[in-house]
Image: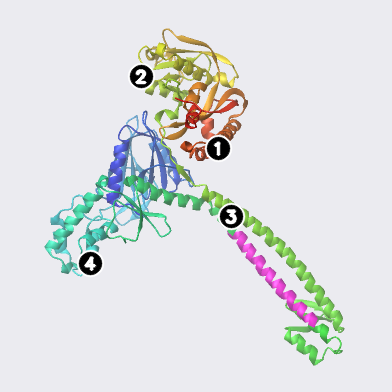
Amino acid sequence: MELSGLELHCLIGDINHKLNQGYYVGSISSISRNSFSLKMRHPNLPDVILLLSTTGIWITKMNFRTFEDSPIISSMKSEIERAKLESIEQVGDERVAYLKFRHLDGRLRVLVAEFFRKGNVIVCDENNMIITILNPVEVRHRTLRTGMTYQSPPPRGINIFDLSIGDLLDLHDKELDQNMEVEKWLGRNVSLSKKYIEEIVTRAKMKHRKLSDTTNEDIEILFEFTRKLVFDVCAPSMHTPLVVLDITGRPANVIPFRLKSISGEAAYVPYETLMEAVDVVFSELLKEEGSSSRTVELDNKIAVLEHDYDQQNQAETEVIEKSNAIRKLAQELMTLSNVVTDTQDKSLSSVLEKNTSKIVTIAGRKFLEVVDESIPFDPRLPRTSSLLFDRAKELERGCQSIRNAKSKLIEQMQDLRKKADLLQKKAAVKLQVEKEWFERYRWFVGSEGLLCIGGRDASSNSAIIRKHLTDQDLVFHAEVHGSPFFVVKNVPTNGAEQFKISLLEAAQATVSFSRAWKDGLSVADAYWVFPEQVKKGAPTGQFLPKGSFVIQGKRNFVKGIEIGLALGVIVLEKKYALMCGPQEAVKRKSIAYCVLLPGGNDPTSLAKKFKQEMVGTCSNISEDFKDLLEYLKSLSIDEIIKTIPHGQSKILITKKGDLLARAVGEVHS
């Protein structure tokens, strides 16, 4: 599938609408040599994955793994990561997009994406000087290399958004080749893709008509249909975008609405937005590319083994044929042994000739040559027959060795094919679950419904206090080295008295996620303060490490807090998520959970055990959670490790949470 200029216009409009609220590039990774994933982040909004390739640009719901590094990924990361997206612009109606990024120090970087021919990705500075380029260009009308000034490609025709009836009439009158068909003439002069050109001439009932057969009225009709089609494509909310399937049911193309020029027998799948439809088709192409690349090495090994197997087959066939020929000659010589006494006998000569064999003398000794084998010849034919039978048996024993070698080759090929099948089934992509902004930190929802967020490290500690702390929040810290900051969000006025349970839970989370867990402590102290007591700058003449802040005024202590947490699976905004926090808070929100205490297993072992316990607990559960097992089985060990405290942990108990208990009628709200 090729992305048209009109479709690019729609996609860029949607992307700008989605990302114009202060998104910046959190990270860039290469999916393949020609495809890149840009994780767009926002302080308070969910992450967005923007895919950029030489075929197109779109927002995806998929999360791709890297299956091939791009030669320009390092340069792209250094030039664009952490920069804020200012805008995405299309060059007229051409298949070229400019993505403008601004760094905090004011530096501007322009990412140019070209989606025609083999495509290109180019990073330029504010003066359009090329910093890095994926595919250097050297053609008649432009040369693009690192260090040169970027030049846009020449326009393919009249900008479709600027097209007027006067333009078409003028082109019609000036065209020298009046025998040209209308669709070819329109395609040469107007910047539209082939499928839209065909749709216009089909609607105008001018398919295969020559220019010489058209009047000014015909050209006016053609213009009206062109303008109507452009309007229809650029107003996607008025139509249902469709994914066109090929004969195998594979997504093959995207159209913004049903086109008359496409066969009515074609199979379609409707989607709500053009972005979703494009994501389906292009993501499928990337998945196929990824699956193919992941098995190339195995395929090469299988090909070598198949070649060896064919050679062994050929060798076995040759040995069997040779053995059969020798055995046949031996049997015929045995029948002559009672009647032939002279090697010059015609009967012997006839048998030898019929079996393509002969008697030769080598170094004074006689040999019987048959199928490239030399067997000592004895005038006593029974003796010669015996020698022939012995040689045939030797060859047949050699066949068994060949068969054993073939069996080993078959086993090796089967093992490699199984690995290749597993790699293909293990897709290079999984569905990207849209996460809430707070899921990048430690978090839990307290028993009283208040959101609590905490830092994972010095950077996230700093981000929570500097970006997310408001006047309605409360700030927690532990009297332990290596304590995170926890913030209880949106506490009502005088809420410290009203939400005592939430404060105790926040205090327990603060001490449990501190160094106290790794040190194996059983209790620790914490305190809370108001936002205005947290000073973000160091006192004069002093230095504060990253993630540290000065606390002024009274500290409200919560002493002797028991260290312990629970890890459970909850439903968060119609999706499953892991939540780690105080036991009662996790129990109230979860489908199932495990109670955790310090000590015992390393994080990897604990994560594997948790996954096993959850799968066992949630087997044969309510239909309300029919896709839960699939989520649990796909849950990565890294994601579990990311959620639990640092250090060793052990599972005390595993239980069904209140969410599952209510679903099966075990408790009542």
Q: Which residues are magenta?
A: 303-331
CA–CA distance in space, label 1 to label 4: 66 Å
Marks 3 and 1, how far apart at CA: 32 Å
Q: Identify the image's colour scheme: rainbow, by chain, secondary structure or one colour.
A: rainbow
**Is residue 577 placed above or below 216 in the rendered structure?**
above
Image depth: mark 2 or mark 1 in front = 1
Q: Which is the main secondary structure of the residues drawn in magenta?
A: helix
Left or right: 620 in relation to 469? right
Indicate the amino acid at tag 1. Ser
Question: Can residue 14 be seen at all in this image of the molecule?
Answer: yes
Membership of 224 in magenta stretch = no
**Secondary structure type for disc 4:** loop
Which disc is residue 628 wearing? none
Residue 316 lies in the magenta-colored region = yes
**Quarter where residue 223 is shown:** bottom left
Residue 572 falls in image quadrant? top left
* Residue in the picture at 23% in, 50% down: 232
Residue 417, numbered circle: 3
Q: Which residue is mark 4?
A: 181
Q: Which residue is mark 2?
A: 470
The residue type indicated by label 3 comes to Arg
Above or below 158: residue 47: above
* Among the two numbered marks 1 and 4 on one chain, the one whose residue lies closer to the N terminus: 4
